[in-house]
Image: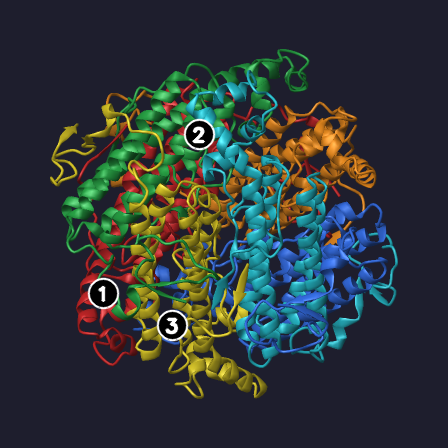
Chain colours: A red, B green, C yellow, D cyan, E blue, F orange
Amino acid sequence: MFYHVKELQFNARVSKPDPRFASLLLEQFGGANGELKAALQYFAQAFPAKQPYPDKYDMLMDIATEEFSHLEIVGATIQMLLNGINGELKDAAEKSEIMQLMDGTSKKESLIHEALSNPQFLVLHGAGPAYKDSQGNPFSGTYINCNGDLSVDLRSNIAAESRAKIVYEYLLQFTDDPYVKETLTFLMTREVAHFQMFEAALATIQPNFPPGVMQADPRYSNTYFNMSNGESVRGPWNEGKTLD
Amino acid sequence: MFYHVKELQFNARVSKPDPRFASLLLEQFGGANGELKAALQYFAQAFPAKQPYPDKYDMLMDIATEEFSHLEIVGATIQMLLNGINGELKDAAEKSEIMQLMDGTSKKESLIHEALSNPQFLVLHGAGPAYKDSQGNPFSGTYINCNGDLSVDLRSNIAAESRAKIVYEYLLQFTDDPYVKETLTFLMTREVAHFQMFEAALATIQPNFPPGVMQADPRYSNTYFNMSNGESVRGPWNEGKTLD
Amino acid sequence: MFYHVKELQFNARVSKPDPRFASLLLEQFGGANGELKAALQYFAQAFPAKQPYPDKYDMLMDIATEEFSHLEIVGATIQMLLNGINGELKDAAEKSEIMQLMDGTSKKESLIHEALSNPQFLVLHGAGPAYKDSQGNPFSGTYINCNGDLSVDLRSNIAAESRAKIVYEYLLQFTDDPYVKETLTFLMTREVAHFQMFEAALATIQPNFPPGVMQADPRYSNTYFNMSNGESVRGPWNEGKTLD
Amino acid sequence: MFYHVKELQFNARVSKPDPRFASLLLEQFGGANGELKAALQYFAQAFPAKQPYPDKYDMLMDIATEEFSHLEIVGATIQMLLNGINGELKDAAEKSEIMQLMDGTSKKESLIHEALSNPQFLVLHGAGPAYKDSQGNPFSGTYINCNGDLSVDLRSNIAAESRAKIVYEYLLQFTDDPYVKETLTFLMTREVAHFQMFEAALATIQPNFPPGVMQADPRYSNTYFNMSNGESVRGPWNEGKTLD
Amino acid sequence: MFYHVKELQFNARVSKPDPRFASLLLEQFGGANGELKAALQYFAQAFPAKQPYPDKYDMLMDIATEEFSHLEIVGATIQMLLNGINGELKDAAEKSEIMQLMDGTSKKESLIHEALSNPQFLVLHGAGPAYKDSQGNPFSGTYINCNGDLSVDLRSNIAAESRAKIVYEYLLQFTDDPYVKETLTFLMTREVAHFQMFEAALATIQPNFPPGVMQADPRYSNTYFNMSNGESVRGPWNEGKTLD
Amino acid sequence: MFYHVKELQFNARVSKPDPRFASLLLEQFGGANGELKAALQYFAQAFPAKQPYPDKYDMLMDIATEEFSHLEIVGATIQMLLNGINGELKDAAEKSEIMQLMDGTSKKESLIHEALSNPQFLVLHGAGPAYKDSQGNPFSGTYINCNGDLSVDLRSNIAAESRAKIVYEYLLQFTDDPYVKETLTFLMTREVAHFQMFEAALATIQPNFPPGVMQADPRYSNTYFNMSNGESVRGPWNEGKTLD
């Protein structure tokens, strides 16, 4: 069972509305590597893990719950980045001034002018967060990996946290709002922390290689197939037996 | 912020494994009218509702949180309906007996025989819940309606609860496990309770018709267009002015 | 069987091409709450409704047919909003001037300059309507709710009309073309009229609560679960029995 | 504008309920090559075709309207194939006999027994048609090809009719109901007729090769690249200049 | 089995980075009528064609392989169009200058300024190609037509090449980079060449009309249904028997 | 550029047709963790990796090419598992015996009887492979992870190979055809080999933790948030600082 605590896990604030960045930040609300994906992935993995790994069940549920709390932080931040817009838009609508704003004939520097250049939020969701990514693609269950084997699922999670981390890294380049940067830094760091927890958990499952149960067939396992013409550059991955 | 309580909101149990019904029950885990859809819909609606309706924000967050708790009940039930399978399957795999089971040459009445007639769970998710509906379609953000206006969103919720209720009703026809029936009856009833709460909340927003802010144009609003040949059967919806 | 009448149901016109608004208006052609979704939803619901509700069958088919006619109005409007573009583009292509237009080095104020800033129409559909929403997402059957029970389906329709209405309301803020505004006002008003028809139809089905057939379990039906810390704001939805 | 005529374009009947075939027939209701796809494709193509091809506009709208009428035939047939089920199911539900039917302990040969072996219709749509294909995938706007150039669009239509024809051909192998076979034969034949109309229309556009406007570059156009080892079998497509 | 040759099939180059055009060019990397769709379509069709048409198998595999090689050309071109961006972005990030670039307060004419106006590449994929179309929709298996009958599949291919050709034609209007134009002209011309090969292959299958095996029913095959009021414009497609 | 070699990379054979297993095996042709997903993922990652990692580019292209070759093995195997069906079906169609086969009144043990119990292949694709998973979901670009940073992408690949390996492991439980088992064992083993190559490649990038470039914020990085009531089971992931 879940309980909701009325405070956010992190005291997220914004300096000023910024609808352009709100649109990018959707990536972490409803995107392929966002907080919803993470929360749902760990939540679903927890059920089959409970037997025989009750400790991993607890860990997966704790991290899933933290990710739901992060989803709330991201949603609240998007709302704050849009909120000023709502008021200005309502005022302008009452004065039938919206089209003038769009044409730039009044208040050209206004935030609303910027919002109107990307009006999808306003047309579709009336200025609130939505389960979409930064390009408007709806959230999809296909983003989620749960395969019912912890030696596989934990590796999926390590990769998922890596992707979530780099998306925050990319996003941080597109805002200079110090409050927003602080929130994103918190969230990005937590992805790194989760990465480390999943690695620690994987290390306690022995043996954990190869993933799953069945062993590899030694006839095919230690060979690098050179599938290209010419010589491939050498590295530790193809310095042994190579077949053309 | 969310907290997770280690007990389920309802003491869900099953009498025996039933992989066939587990597959149908996915409809309420990852389906278009399932618990995840409900939870996410109310959660996203809460952000723009907070101003100027802090009371509706609390209600939406409370019900969203209850729906996440229902999602957990459904997931735990699916896991229990599959769990016996896991053990039998592992035993059979060790003895290389799975194909014999499929061919019906041994233990024909076994649960595993039934599981194997619909092996998608096992092939894809190793016997655990997944964000799919009963036909295997992945969960989609398109299921979710949030339009940033409470007089619209609450009506979306009333309809959503109606659909969730009838899906439980349909599902109840496909199990005779008394424990599962009790759990589904609890969940179905809570949909009805939420329906009533959303109706009560809508009634406190005045005026709430038409939905949104703009008024209808009286020139076009009170007319029934008869778009078919012959006479349409009469009812209160087309007893006034009708245009051919 | 359907027949096509060569005139539109409403004399839709535009003052001038406006590719930016054409792109937004796609929301009502191929979007989640657009005319196609409405037409298809009522059309599919009509089949199972025919027995035992032949009057509702007629109503659903009439409104579905009107929605197909609205789809045609929206498509024709999008085409008119793009049409000037086609000609200008062809002229420019013949003179190899398109890139200059994009760079703003000639005819900077041209409509085509605006079209080129959002060239998806031209790249994908050669300047015509498409079954996409305003963000380019393809139309999806997941938008459509038909559950085979009229006490549910009519509530889905009331909510669907509410959403269609507010999307027209939002769209009206992004055009100042008086002809387009007149068309959108007609279409918006018809959604309100349909809303009222579905409510009138629902009222003739008695009893219609709870939706579906099965009754709620009184042990679980009249309780508000307070799923959050602190006190939730009170309203008519949680003034009775509340459980923490 | 559309009008609805209360009679079907073809007097579709069924000999007896057949939920298994109803499920397959969904392919032509909401599938990738079904009637809805065809109707919507020609309808959308008509708008940009109107100028400069008013004759093609009329043809596209006429065929689109016929395809909507075929969609109605398919939907009505699916409903008839399911209808007996509804009654039996309701009776059984009242007597709490459904699970017995599933277990085969009563009325083993009943139609409902067969329906229950594939209960998705009943769980999701209460025994009515839905915008899905025979595997349960929701209809998608991605099925539809409209590219705004008639020399391209008509070729898309010729291919679409070819695919629709073969799907009817495949479906005809899975029913021996003489009424259903008659209906499918009518629908299959109309696809062939449309195929011929689109070919005739394409022939009136001169030149129509290459599709579109731009000419091919002769340096690259008359060459067959042999992209495989060994010799490819020869045919008229690679008897000219071949490059390795 | 496939082999990779380290050279591109065409010596693709770019004059300068152009992130705006890179975004449009995605249409041919991961779009509905792009190179990936073509390659996968012919590849899948080849398997069932092998018996009884080994010559068509060779042709389909050769053209599929060429389309994979075109996919590589498109991907390499997108990478070149983005590459300068990567370096500038990294420099700016190190100097914390990105936001200034976005605000236009420094290096206003920079390529990166343009990239930042459409930052999805950078947020999602760190400046590399992705399996998306020019609007950000993910590649979908629904784009691909393979129906297991060559008289149908080859017609699907003729239409597919027509669409691919016109998309290149449209794209050519949005770049004035002579190197890019040369590459796109090569690729566009190859679509025309493939169109001709598929037509030649279809002609060797006799009879190939109607598509598939079953014959049309002469009662329904030579009739034009006039589904609209008034007279439809006449053409060779409706000059014979017409039914109202 | 790619070349196609007419031999398969592995001498795949089947003992007898098996349409049921062909349907499951689609999981590795068009499924979320199948060969197509792997091939496309590494292919797209190669472009941005080329600078500054030409060695990783070679490796990614070599493995992508091997995965395309595996896709061909899987497709050829599916075709062989279906091929007998084609012949029998054609014979039966000529004798109008298909429905009798379905009803079990003749040749009850026939392979075609089994095929007919799951006729989607035949209805949709005429007995050939398709870009779908074992439940009929179309292949989706959302399965593919490429984020433009090798320290992230290689981790995505390690996880992807883990998932591909376990799906082969699951599939091996559903066939007892020794030839098919041999092929699947080869393919499964190659996933393990690729897993090891990606790990070796990641180890040569130093530092590779945290993924990406930015450092974690030490204030938030070494803390386990206990998001649940009661005590979570302890493990190396939460033995340090824990916050309630």
Q: Residue type at mark 2?
A: Leu
Is residue F213 in view from this perspective? no
Picture residue at 52% right of the left edge, 68% below the top:
C4
Q: Name the residue tied to disc 2.
A: B25
x%, y% of residue C108?
41, 85
Between E38 and C239, the residue placed more toward the observer is C239
Q: Name the residue tied to disc 3.
A: C21
Disc 3 and disc 2 in contact, CB within 8 angstroms: no
What distance separates the C-alpha of mark 1 from that of mark 2? 43 Å
Q: Which mark is residue B215?
A: 1
Q: Where is B220 relative to D34, above or below?
A: below
Picture residue at 61% right of the left edge, 61% below the top:
E34
What distance separates the C-alpha of mark 3 from that of mark 1? 22 Å
User: Disc 2 is attached to a residue of which chain?
Assistant: B
x%, y% of residue B139?
44, 41
Picture residue at 76% right of the left edge, 24% below the top:
F109
Q: Where is D193 relative to C233, above or below?
A: below
Between A180 and A96, the residue placed more toward the observer is A96
x%, y% of residue F133?
59, 40
Front: mark 3 or 1: 1
Answer yes or no: are tags 1 and 2 on the same subunit: yes
Q: Secondary structure at mark 2?
A: helix
Mark 3 crowdedness (10 Å alpha carbons): few <14, some 14-19, many ≥20: some
Front: mark 3 or 2: 2
